[in-house]
Amino acid sequence: MKIVARYSHKGGELFISSCHQAELKEVETIIAGIDASLCKTKASKEKTMLGKKLYSPIALNKAFNGAFENKGWGKKKLEMVTQVPEIHETHYGFREMDFVKNKLGVEVQLGKYAFMVYNVLAKMTIFANRGFIDAGIEIVPMLTLAKSMSTGVSYFEQMKSGLEYRGESDIDIPVLIIGIDAKPRSLPRYLVN
């Protein structure tokens, strides 16, 4: 996989590159080591792409999981309990972060837009408030990669514009959004010297 773009939310890139330099380098190495061609295994059942080979989010997640685990990154699960007095019940649940190492959290999100935004604006804040992380990285596909996956997969460009238009909040934590693609990209001719 290739890193194509980065977006720094609440100073994420500067904070992570100065406070988590080794972990950032590992994340970049892990991304570069994922062979996306091995994950183009899903035969589409959708009308508009019937029979077309697509990148499988399940296969990509499995590749990322193995690569992060091999570098000593672990999942972090947070048990959650909340009272609902109106119905006299206690609700038990949990949140889980894909990978955590030395207080840096990483989420690989190859799904819907709501999950990408939730990871950055809610889940990472919850884990930071509990002292498990102090910054996060969200790895998401670029639009060109999302077009080679099932319909409905969100992408970097969409997430970046949403965060830019939303702005930053006092409760947000530093997060670096990394946009990935399966193939290297060439610059448009007008940008090449």
Image (spheres, rainbow, N blue to C red):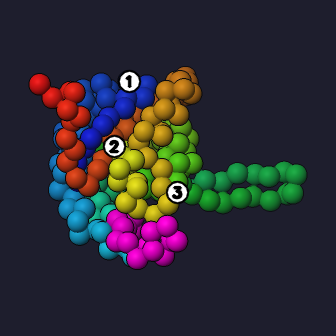
Q: Earlier in the sequence, mark 1 or mark 3?
A: 1
- For the question of whether residue 107 can be seen, the reply is no
> Front-most of 90 and 157?
157
Q: Kindly state the secondary structure of the residue where label 3 is placed.
A: loop
Q: Residue type at mark 1? A: Gly
Check whether the beta carbons of the residues at disc 2 and disc 1 lie within 8 A of each other: no
Q: Earlier in the sequence, mark 2 or mark 1?
A: 1
Give me the disc on residue 152.
3
In the image, residue 57 lies in the stretch drawn in magenta: yes
How dense is the environment of label 3, judged by Cα within 10 Å: few (below 14), some, or many (20 and up)? Answer: few
Give me the disc on residue 11.
1
- For the question of whether residue 144 can be seen, the reply is yes
How dense is the environment of label 1, judged by Cα within 10 Å: few (below 14), some, or many (20 and up)? Answer: some
The residue mark sitting in front, 3 or 2, is: 3
- Please provide percent x and percent y for residue 156: 41, 42
Q: How many marks?
A: 3
Span shown in magenta = 44-58
How dense is the environment of label 2, judged by Cα within 10 Å: few (below 14), some, or many (20 and up)? Answer: many
Q: Is 176 on the left or on the right of 163, as rendered?
A: left
Q: Is 193 on the left or on the right of 161, as rendered?
A: left
Q: Residue at x 50, y 60 (%)?
A: 151
Disc 2 designates what residue? 179
Q: Residue at x 29, y 68 (%)?
A: 39
